[in-house]
Amino acid sequence: MALYCIGDIQGCDSALGRLLDTLGFSPSRDTVYLLGDLVNRGPDSAAVLRRCMRHDGALRSLLGNHDLHLLAAAHGARAPSRRDTLQPVLDAPDRSALLDWVRQQPLARTHEHAGQTLLMVHAGVLPAWSAADTVALADEVHGVLRGRDLPAFLRSMYGNTPARWSDALQGADRLRVIVNALTRLRFCSPEGVMDFESTESASAAPPGLLPWFDLPGRRTAHTLVAFGHWSTLGWLNRPHLLGLDTGCVWGGCLSAVRFGATLADREHIQVHCEQAQQPG
């Protein structure tokens, strides 16, 4: 049995298939975690979702901002953008099954491996949150995604405020902060105020901001966190941090990590991708 994480796929099913072949993936034996943004901007989002559904249990997904955007577009809560490639999913004969599968996926996961905890999110974790907090807060959103209030939630999901976490937050504001942190976060102030304007690399942080993972006092600093979302950051490998979005949809690579006997024992594996989108 092998354990893997894979970064942002964004509808690039051919690259995902080649990477799984390179890994020697066996759904009866292996566990692969996909770190969100399964769909959009690439050429075949529907095929990615069908592959995940076919191997559900072996391919374990979590949701990114593009996956939530798919649900919002399907429920009329968000207009398509010029770069979207979601229409084949929305027009698919199995549309209902695809969308129902997406809404069942969580926004955070943990996996216990050799007595250690691996925390997985799409984008980031706020400094005040422990690993247990992160999963519990993600579960609050997950409950709404699976419930009857999904359309109303999707209509209230977008926006950049509140920009910081408070335990006192309630209702739509509380859920929006959780979603923004887990699916959109890159930079943050030392006081925990999120920024959503800059998409530059970590080395080009705007004045007064830091990458979320470099914030002092972050409660998950000693838990291995694996994330995607940040293609301009690229491959990042620290003892307690793995960044796995290496820009597949932009003509970069689709990256995986294979874990060994411990979470510290890891191997980086990638395949090159055909460019599906032009930056800018």
Image (cartoon, helix red, strand yellow):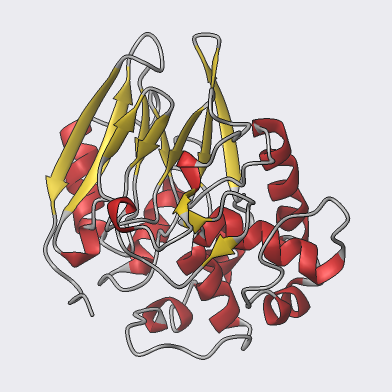
Is residue 59 among what the camera can see? no
Image: 62 above or below 50:
above
Query: Is 145 left, or right, of 193 in this rendering?
Result: right
Q: Which x, y percent locates residue 277?
A: 20, 75
Farthest front residue?
A: 207
Q: Residue at x 31, y 63 (%)?
A: 200
Front in this rendered view, residue 123 or 257 = 123
Residue 86 makes an appearance in the image? yes
Q: Which residue is nearer to you in this view: 31 or 69?
A: 69
Q: Quadrant of the N terminus?
A: top left
Residue 119 in the image, given as x and y percentages of width and height: 54, 33
Quarter occupied by residue 25:
top left
Q: Residue at x 36, y 30 (%)?
A: 4
Using the image, determine if residue 169 lies above or below residue 266. Answer: below
Q: Residue at x 71, y 54 (%)?
A: 142
Q: Compare residues 169 and 39 and report the one nearer the observer.
A: 169
Q: How many marks?
A: 0
Q: In the displayed structure, does residue 165 sit left or right of residue 256?
A: right
From the viewer's side, name the closer residue of 148 and 91: 148
| Image position, residue 44 (x, y; %) | 29, 69
